[in-house]
Image (spheres, grey):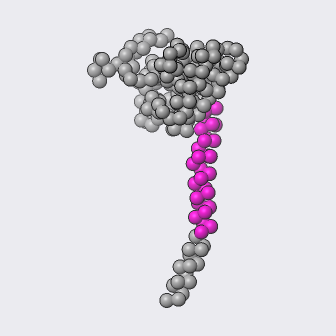
């Protein structure tokens, strides 16, 4: 990439170059740079759960009177885009990262903040999207929610298919045996 393919992001740790079209910011870029371990990123169910959690937290913060309703609505709309899988390519953090998942939490905060700010409201990843949360709140919850998503959308249908296949198996075997016996 050429220098013009990057933008400069600034945070409490300094300046960092981030790809121009990335929806994430400096914290995510640091995770990409510091933890290039497996090349595996977080699964779709986990990203979906992060979006659901961030939307729920924004709603709770409105109800508690802690955040401006316009900002929270922009966060909820952006979090829905994350949950719907519209921006999965902007979650490049390696699955093997810091122990508490801070990199994934910050990745979600930055992507949601960027999307929400594109809607015309200035939204800060820490002060607004992450308001009242820590990685120790978000990541274990996302693990549980994503496991439930996986169970309901993948495991249970697979088990239903297996049970159906096994129920029909004796019928197919009986028919085959009867046909062999006739010949």
Where residue 101 appears, as percent x and y from the top left, is: 55, 28
- Which residues make up the magenta segment? 140-168
State the residue in front, 75 or 183.
Answer: 75
* Snapshot quadrant of residue 35: top left
Q: How many marks?
A: 0
Where residue 98 appears, as percent x and y from the top left, is: 52, 27
145 falls in the magenta region? yes
**Residue reaching furthest to the left:** 2
Does residue 57 appear to the left or right of 26 in the view shown?
right
**Residue reaching furthest to the bottom:** 183
Look at 42% across and 35% down and name the residue there: 39
Q: Is residue 98 something one can see in this rendering?
A: no
142 falls in the magenta region? yes
State the residue in front, 106 or 164.
Answer: 164
In the rendered image, which quarter contains the N terminus?
top left
Look at 58% across and 64% down and name the residue there: 165
Look at 37% across and 20% down and name the residue there: 20
Is residue 171 shown above or below 155? below
Is residue 66 shown above or below 34? above
Is residue 172 shown above or below 136? below
Give the prevailing secondary structure in the magenta stretch: helix
Q: Is residue 177 something one can see in this rendering?
A: yes
Where residue 57 appears, as percent x and y from the top left, is: 64, 24
* Snapshot quadrant of residue 160: bottom right
């Amino acid at each position: 990439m050429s220098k013009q393919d990057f933008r400069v992001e600034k945070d409490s740790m300094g300046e960092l170059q981030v790809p121009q079209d990335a929806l994430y910011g400096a914290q995510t870029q640091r995770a990409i740079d510091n933890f290039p371990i497996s090349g595996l990123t977080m699964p779709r169910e986990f990203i979906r759960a992060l979006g659901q959690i961030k939307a729920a937290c924004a709603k709770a913060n409105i109800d508690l009177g802690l955040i401006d309703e316009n900002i929270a609505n922009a966060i909820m709309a952006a979090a829905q885009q994350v949950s719907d899988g519209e921006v999965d390519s902007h979650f490049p953090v390696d699955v093997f990262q810091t122990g508490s998942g801070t990199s994934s939490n910050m990745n979600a905060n930055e992507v949601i903040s960027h999307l929400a700010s594109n809607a015309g409201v200035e939204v800060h990843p820490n002060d607004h999207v992450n308001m009242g949360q820590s990685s120790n709140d978000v990541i274990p919850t996302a693990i549980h929610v994503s496991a439930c998503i996986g169970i309901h959308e993948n495991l249970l249908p697979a088990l239903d298919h297996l049970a159906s296949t096994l129920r029909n198996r004796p019928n197919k075997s009986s028919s085959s045996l009867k046909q062999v016996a006739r010949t």
